[in-house]
Amino acid sequence: MRPPDPRAPMTELVPDPLADGGIAGFGAEFRALNASAEAVTAAYLARIEVLDRRLGCFETVMADSALAQARAMDRLYAAGTDLGPLMGVPVAIKDIVAVDGAPTTAGSNVAVDDLIGPEGSFVRALKQAGCVILGKTRTPEFANGGGRFAISSVRPTPWNPWDAKTQRVPGGSSSGSAVAVAAGLCAFAVGSDTGASVRAPAALCGVFGLKTTVGLWPLDGVFPLSRSLDTLGILTAIAADAGVVLGAIHGSPPLDVASPRGLRLGLPEPSFFFEGLDPRVRSRTDAALDALRGAGVELVPVAWPEVPQVAKHMSGVVAAEFMAGMGRERFEAVRKQMDPYVAAGLAAGLETRAVDYVNAIRGYHAYSRAAAERMAGVDAFVTPTVAIVAPAVACFEDRDFYDRHSSIGMRNTRPASFAGLCATSSPVQGPEPGLPVGLQVIAPGFAEARAIAIAGTIEKAVGPPSRPELGPFVEGAGYRE
């Protein structure tokens, strides 16, 4: 296979090279010398050239360095060195994470390089595993995009690929990463999740998302929104791909659930997670739960009465810790350069008293202990990820709409974050047409492999997710995917 030249004008969309076999399939073909890292990288760069003109999910495309890395992986393997399951696998990285050779904007016009620092441990681990870095994906300012689902006045909002006629929100703040995976512009993408930022865009863009436990992956070289709650995460097409990534980074094989008949999943009560659901979310959630029951999974009600306490403390922790990093004087000096919604939300940190912050952190630890106790006796909790499907971007021009929906994007995801748990979001629309819906799995801290395995069971029960129709995004060209 001769790789396409990503620098040449493209008029056709080449196929997603990992659409059928995923990361594991590529690995097998790579080792059988039926696929090369260069060809796969060039294919993704060609797809980016065609599709990202409208999708706008990349802040920076690193075409030359990506092709150089890919060729190096091919030569290294030919010389007898195998770096493992991610060797030659192309990845996109959220633009709050430093990568050598590319600027890190954190979605802002405010220079924050000093707060981010140089390329950190996690990116170095990806490179040591043989990953090829395609570029940096867009994020709303300072990864603070939950309230408006990633709409930003500072950077263009990536276009959710599930609707070519109406621009719909992709979810925030790992919006660019989710769109890149949904459109088949990378093998997987790196995001971050403080309260929703991997899981919400995964749900609204119809991909799989993993929010890791605080402390699992290092945060040096990552913009600090809230160091008590910030986590790195990954977005993939399917759960199995996330299992490969997790296993490769930690040097262990992915976990599998041999039979769903041994699984016991909790449905948290009170009905906080299931209130006010869009009828489409309700329908597909119910269908997914019925499919799990039919496969032999035991679903049991579990009390989690502490959940309403999350909103009381979490926003205060995030705003205070952001302000501690940014500094009062610096924030005041640059505030007018910031997105007004982001600035208004983070400005609460200016008024946070020390006693209030300490009480919020104490609440965090108490809530975490209570959540661990509530999870005893079940393998994980399962809930809808986001209560609504992706709204149109234009809806947020209406202040009343914003006021009604500004918290709903993180309502179901925040409890896991504030409890120190890991979580996933799986697409559950199956092969049906329509906007994506996500189902969230919440597992104990550092049980990421278990959460991914349970998500794989959900995929088997519900069926493989559908993919967006990308033909309408190819302007003036023959479409042959």
Image (cartoon, grey):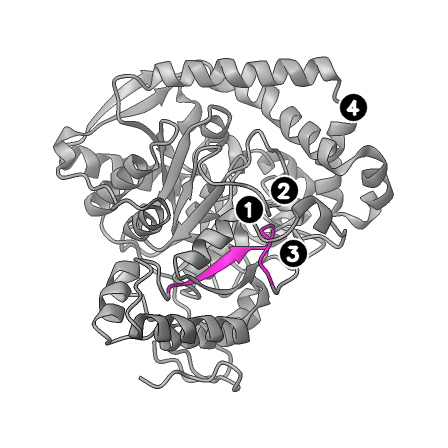
For label 2, the crowd category at 10 Å Cα-Cα, with few meaning under 14, some 14 to 19 and many 20 or more, is: many
At a point 40% along the width and 16% down the height, the residue shown is 304
Q: Which residue is mark 4?
A: 351
Q: Earlier in the sequence, mark 2 or mark 4?
A: 2
Real-space Cα separation, disc 2 to disc 4, in angstroms? 19 Å
Closer to the observer: label 4 or label 1?
Answer: 4
Residue 320 horizontal/vertical position (percent): 70, 28
Real-space Cα separation, disc 4 to disc 1, in angstroms? 25 Å
Q: Which residue is mark 1?
A: 172
- Kindly identify the amino acid type of the residue bearing the numbered disc 2: Asn
Q: Quadrant of the N terminus?
A: bottom left
Q: Which residues are magenta?
A: 89-100
- Kindly identify the amino acid type of the residue bearing the numbered disc 1: Gly
Q: Which residue is mark 2?
A: 144
Q: Earlier in the sequence, mark 3 or mark 2?
A: 3
Taking the image as shown, residue 379 lies to the left or right of residue 123, namely left
- Kindly identify the amino acid type of the residue bearing the numbered disc 4: Glu
Q: Are marks 2 and 1 in contact (CB under 8 Å)?
A: yes
For label 4, the crowd category at 10 Å Cα-Cα, with few meaning under 14, some 14 to 19 and many 20 or more, is: few
Visible in this render: residue 171? Answer: yes
